[in-house]
Structure formats: C-alpha cells, structure tokens
Image (cartoon, rainbow, N blue to C red):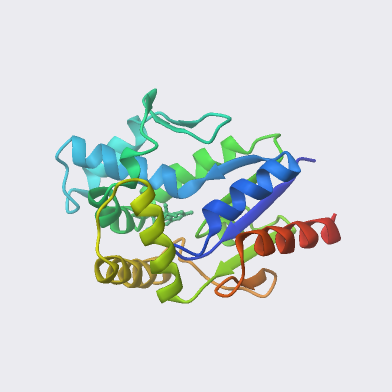
Amino acid sequence: MNKVIAIDGPAGSGKGTITKKVAEKLGLIYIDTGATYRCVALACLRNNINLEEKEKIINLTKSLNIDFDVNGKTYLNKEDVSNLIRSKEVSAIVSPISSIPEVREILVDLQRKMANNKDVIMEGRDITTVVFPNTKYKFYLDADPTERAKRRMKQNEEMGISMSFEEILDSINKRDYNDMHKSVGALKRCDDQIYIDTTKMTIDEVVQTVIENIKNMD
Ligand code: DC
C-alpha cells in the first residue's frame, strides 16, 4: 500500500515550506493542491472569464492540463507557471474559484490520481477530510494570523511581489473566512488530525515534530 501524508491548514501556516522539507527528508513526492486551484484562477484571468461565469469556469477547468515535476514546479498546459500562480491577481480570485463544487470535484479527482501508487505528502485545505479521509497520517498546521501575514510578507519580498503588511493581513483574514465557510471542501479541524500550532516554532522544529509523528504511526 502506498503511503499518503495529508496536511491541512490556513494560508501562511507554513504548510508549503514544512511539507517540502518533510518530503525531502523522507523521500516522498510533494503535492501542493493549492497550486491546482491557482492554475484554474490564472487560466480564468488569461481567458477573461469573470467569477460570475460559473459554467465557463467549470468547462475551462475540464480542459486544463495541470502537472507537477519532481522539483515541485507547476505546469499549466506544459508551461511553467510556478511564479505566475503566486501573483496578487491570482490570490485575489482563487478562493471564490475554489468554492465552486464542480471545480473541486475535477481537481480532487486529479489530486487523487497524482497520488496513485506513490508515497506522497499532500498539502491543502481538505486533504485530511475529503481527498484522503482514510489515511492514518493527518496533520493540521496552524499559526496566529499576524504571524502568518509576517511569513507571507517575507515570501512575497523574496518573489518580488509588492504588498503592504495590512494588505496581506486583510487578504489572509478574507481567505480564512472563505476557506472555512465553503459549502464543500471547507478547511476544518477534526479529532483524528495531529494539530500543531507553529506560531512560536522554528521551521526545523515543526519539520521534526511532523517526522516524529509519522514515524510513531508507521
Ligand atoms: O494554499 P494556497 O494559498 O496556495 O491555496 C490557494 C487557494 O486554494 C486557497 O484560497 C484555498 C484553496 N484551496 C482549497 O480550497 N483546497 C485545497 N485543497 C487547497 C487550496
């Protein structure tokens, strides 16, 4: 049986960084499901489809070829869009797009296929609850919104994206609300997740904690 480590948590909780490091250390394939929703958002912007045009968004989602390579780069119809999907414009519309149940159905199916017969670590919002509810390795990473905004600010600076701290905090709060109140695939805490509050922890401490828990469950 292949092994699936499922990691959920809000924007800026450190999921991406932690998941990549755990993947490297344990030799697992890293799958960032947020990137799949971001690809749909980028494709909508490029095709001038607005958020009210649900049918068009669903048909567009069906037509897309989304893929990752072994280095974690994201490809949309064979084009490397790893940086483009992090733009302010994509971040502004990705949450409402990810609230469309039909879009989720298509992408959840794709995410499950990506994990087929492979040992993976997958991060997102509904991995522990919808995509792989039967895996025994379930984590929820959390942190205070202010700390998460600080982390996002640093990441944005590294990628040359200019946004003020207030703008980032506001976008995080809006996204938290949307992500937690979706009719399907909402970000949820549940009893069988291992909950880790990373606010006061270093990246290495979180990585270590996740790895120890995985080993204890093996
Ligand atoms: O993790 P991220 O910020 O790149 O995610 C982008 C958006 O996609 C975010 O608003 C939540 C949504 N998302 C989701 O609904 N389900 C997932 N499994 C992953 C992300």
Picture coordinates of residue 77, whole percent (x, y): 36, 25
Of residues 58 and 96, the one drawn nearer to the viewer in this rendering? 96
Residue visible at 68% across and 41% down in the picture: 24
What residue occupies the far top of the structure in this picture? Answer: 78
Residue visible at 42% across and 50% down in the picture: 104
How many marks the image carries: the answer is 0
Q: Along the horizontal axis of the image, is 114 left or right of 52?
A: right
Of residues 160 and 67, the one drawn nearer to the viewer in this rendering? 160
Picture coordinates of residue 133, whole percent (x, y): 64, 58
Name above or below for residue 174 compared with residue 37. Answer: below
Instruction: Let me know if residue 120 appears in the view.
Output: no
Within the image, what quadrant is residue 192 found in? Answer: bottom right
Q: Along the horizontal axis of the image, is 155 left or right of 217?
A: left
Residue visible at 31% across and 39% down in the picture: 84
Q: Along the horizontal axis of the image, is 179 left or right of 210?
A: left
Picture coordinates of residue 148, whole percent (x, y): 44, 68
Residue visible at 16% across and 48% down in the picture: 50
Of residues 100 and 92, the one drawn nearer to the viewer in this rendering? 92
Picture coordinates of residue 173, whole percent (x, y): 34, 73
Q: Along the horizontal axis of the image, is 68 left or right of 210?
A: left
Quadrant, the N terminus: top right
Ligand 1 lies in quarter: bottom left
Instruction: Let me know if residue 104 appears in the view.
Output: yes
Name above or below for residue 16 compared with residue 205. Answer: above
Quadrant, the C terminus: bottom right
